[in-house]
């Protein structure tokens, strides 16, 4: 049992990476989507315009603010498990958190800083995170997970690229890089979690080795990323996205998805992965001029990344605070609500473009309610010691 201490750094909140970053990421998501929804509603609470236009601010901050906070919380927690080493905690973890907060402040509030000063502060978080992960990975020579250091490097380069060129393609690369993480991690945990849950229910289920498909899935997303930079809006992009869609769909046929629908903590992950397949299919059609890119991007972000994040932060919070992997009605309702939020944002403007603002506002409201529900249910777990007495 850990020894009690009055030190701020010894508080449970600073014990594991998921605690501060899931809290901060969820809180920021609520704040930023509230501002975004208010902007479309004509309320005088608008996104910052001192540095970026509102659309660019929203796009950048949902990637490098919200998504990166959750990625940081997950990887800081997971790497400690993968390597068997001590997790990043206490002063080190507080430093990373403050660095992330500093990025959100300079991107959202005009402090009179020059562009290079804003950029220097904002882009510093990803390399600091990568270094914090690289030390235990190299020390244990955990080669299997070096890929995450490569993906973080791409995210850093894309962020610098965005600031230097104000190019939306940089954010598309960043989104695809996070989707590579989703594909990589999802390919590991979704079948493993599903099979384990089915066996607990007495259902004989087995994992299927799909190592070749897993590699092809990652490479196919790389191909799509390159097409988004060099062949956006062309049939070449359409073909690459269609191929990736098929590969990811083939992987999913061995995930026992129909049998996972009884457990919300399982089906939300399957739903997030299904949104990846749907998003790639829409991206393929956009390459042939059928759908608008904005709708496609939101299938991959609000649908895939949003669902996977909400499902994982609930599961990780329960598991790593020593609770049973069981959720209440409010959490289950939030899982359904985020599907509706994504569907409204993607398909609403497609089929009823005259009401695009209304679709965006409604989707933003649902999104904020989902992550508000997470904080209502789980914030006490993030700040309190484990009930089993183990180290936070």
Image (tube, rainbow, N blue to C red):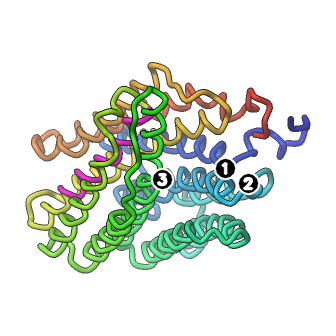
Q: Nearer the viewer, residue 311 or 49?
A: 311
The residue that label 1 is drawn on is: 17
Image quarter in which the N terminus is found:
top right
Q: Are marks 3 and 1 in contact (CB under 8 Å)?
A: no
Q: Label 2 crowding class (10 Å Cα cut-off): few <14, some 14-19, many 20+? A: many
Residue 87's label in the rendered image is: 2
Alpha carbon of mark 3 to alpha carbon of mark 2: how far?
Answer: 21 Å
Write the start and end of the magenta stretch as one range. Answer: 265-281
Residue 41 visible in image: no
Question: How far apart are labels 2 and 1 at the CA level?
Answer: 8 Å
Task: Identify the disc placed on residue 67.
Answer: 3
Above or below residue 275? Residue 113 is: below
Q: Earlier in the sequence, mark 3 or mark 1?
A: 1
Give the quarter of the image for residue 113.
bottom right
Q: Which mark is residue 265?
A: none
Residue at point 38%, 45% (across, down): 36
Residue occupying image coordinates x 47% and y 73%: 154
Q: Residues within 10 Å of mark 1 (few under 14, many from 20)?
A: many
The image shows residue 64, relative to residue 73, as above or below, that is below
- Viewport quadrant of the C terminus: top right
- On the image, the x and y values in percent for residue 377 come to 56, 25
Label 3 and label 1: CA atoms lie apart by 14 Å
Q: Position of residue 262 (x, y in %)?
A: 36, 26
Query: Do the residues under discs 2 and 1 have CB atoms within 8 angstroms?
Result: yes
Q: Tag 2 or tag 3, which sits nearer the N-term?
A: 3
329 or 111: nearer the viewer: 329
- The label nearer to you, 3 versus 1, is 1
**Element under label 3?**
helix
């Amino acid at each position: 049992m850990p020894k009690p201490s009055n030190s701020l750094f010894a508080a449970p909140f600073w014990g594991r990476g998921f605690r501060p970053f899931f809290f901060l990421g969820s809180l920021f998501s609520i704040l930023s989507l509230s501002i975004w929804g208010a902007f479309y509603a004509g309320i005088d609470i608008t996104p910052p315009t001192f540095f970026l236009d509102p659309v660019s601010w929203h796009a950048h901050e949902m990637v490098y603010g919200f998504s990166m906070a959750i990625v940081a919380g997950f990887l800081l927690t997971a790497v400690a498990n993968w390597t068997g080493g001590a997790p990043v905690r206490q002063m080190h973890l507080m430093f990373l958190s403050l660095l992330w907060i500093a990025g959100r402040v300079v991107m959202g509030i005009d402090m009179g800083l020059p562009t290079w000063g804003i950029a220097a502060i904002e882009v510093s978080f990803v390399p600091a995170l990568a270094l914090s992960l690289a030390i235990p990975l190299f020390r244990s020579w955990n080669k299997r997970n070096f890929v995450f250091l490569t993906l973080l490097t791409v995210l850093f380069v894309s962020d610098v690229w965005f600031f230097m060129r104000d190019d939306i393609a940089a954010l598309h690369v960043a989104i695809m890089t996070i989707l590579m993480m989703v594909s990589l991690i999802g390919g590991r945990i979704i079948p493993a979690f599903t099979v384990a849950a089915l066996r607990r229910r007495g259902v004989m289920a087995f994992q299927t080795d799909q190592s070749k498909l897993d590699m092809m899935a990652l490479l196919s997303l790389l191909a799509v990323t390159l097409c988004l930079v060099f062949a956006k809006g062309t049939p070449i992009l359409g073909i690459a996205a269609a191929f990736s869609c098929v590969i990811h769909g083939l992987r999913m046929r061995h995930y026992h998805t129909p049998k996972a629908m009884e457990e919300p903590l399982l089906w939300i992950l399957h739903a997030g992965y299904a949104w990846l397949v749907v998003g790639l299919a829409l991206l393929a059609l956009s390459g042939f001029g059928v759908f608008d890119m904005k709708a496609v991007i939101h299938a991959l972000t609000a649908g895939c990344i949003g669902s996977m994040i909400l499902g994982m932060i609930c599961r990780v919070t329960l598991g790593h605070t020593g609770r049973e992997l069981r959720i209440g009605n409010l959490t289950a309702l939030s899982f359904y609500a985020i599907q509706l939020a994504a569907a409204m944002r993607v398909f609403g403007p497609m089929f009823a473009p005259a009401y695009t603002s209304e679709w965006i506002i409604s989707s933003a409201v649902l999104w904020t309610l989902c992550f508000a529900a997470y904080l209502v249910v789980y914030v006490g777990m993030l700040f309190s010691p484990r009930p089993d007495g183990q180290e936070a």
